[in-house]
């Protein structure tokens, strides 16, 4: 229900700030993600298209050119989770 409400607000030009641990679900409705570091400063700004440059191999997020053949393409939520781990 909450995500449907967010989607209904998508075309209103509003900025919505969300804090959640449901990264996979949130990534489905986000246009961008801004990750704050422990110091409260912006640590990373991520766009969904940024995932095109990455692959996931086991627990690692790698640049697509450096990834082993058995890797899977990264998704937006993979980038968000990785940014949260290192921030």
Image (spheres, rainbow, N blue to C red):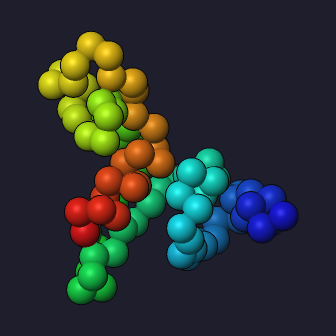
Of residues 13 and 65, the one drawn nearer to the viewer in this rendering: 65
Residue at the far front: name it.
58
Quarter occupied by residue 21? bottom right
Residue at the far left: name it.
66
Quarter occupied by residue 80? bottom left
Depicted 27 relative to depicted 72: above or below: below
Residue at the far right: name it.
1
Q: In which quadrant of the rendered image does the C terminus lie? A: bottom left
Q: Residue at x 45, y 38 (%)?
A: 75
Q: Residue at x 46, y 44 (%)?
A: 76
Looking at the image, can residue 8 be seen? Answer: no
Residue at the far top: name it.
69
Of residues 35 and 56, the one drawn nearer to the viewer in this rendering: 56
Looking at the image, can residue 76 be seen? Answer: yes
Q: Residue at x 80, y 59 (%)?
A: 4
In the rendered image, residue 19, in percent from the top left (x then y), is placed at: 54, 75
Depicted 2 relative to depicted 10: above or below: below
**How many numbered marks does the figure carry?**
0
Q: Residue at x 69, y 59 (%)?
A: 10
Of residues 56 and 49, the one drawn nearer to the viewer in this rendering: 56
In the rendered image, residue 3, in percent from the top left (x then y), is placed at: 74, 61
**Left or right of 9, for residue 32:** left
**Left or right of 54, for residue 8:** right
Q: In which quadrant of the rendered image does the N terminus lie? A: bottom right
In the rendered image, residue 33, in percent from the top left (x then y), is placed at: 44, 60
**Left or right of 10, for residue 56:** left
């Amino acid at each position: 229900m909450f995500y449907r409400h967010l989607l209904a607000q998508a075309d209103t030009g509003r900025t919505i700030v969300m804090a959640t641990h449901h990264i996979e679900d949130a990534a489905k409705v986000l246009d961008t993600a801004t990750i704050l570091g422990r110091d409260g400063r912006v640590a990373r700004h991520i766009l969904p298209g940024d995932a095109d440059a990455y692959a996931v191999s086991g627990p690692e997020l790698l640049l697509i050119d450096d990834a082993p053949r058995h890797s899977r393409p990264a998704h937006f939520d993979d980038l968000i989770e990785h940014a949260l781990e290192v921030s």
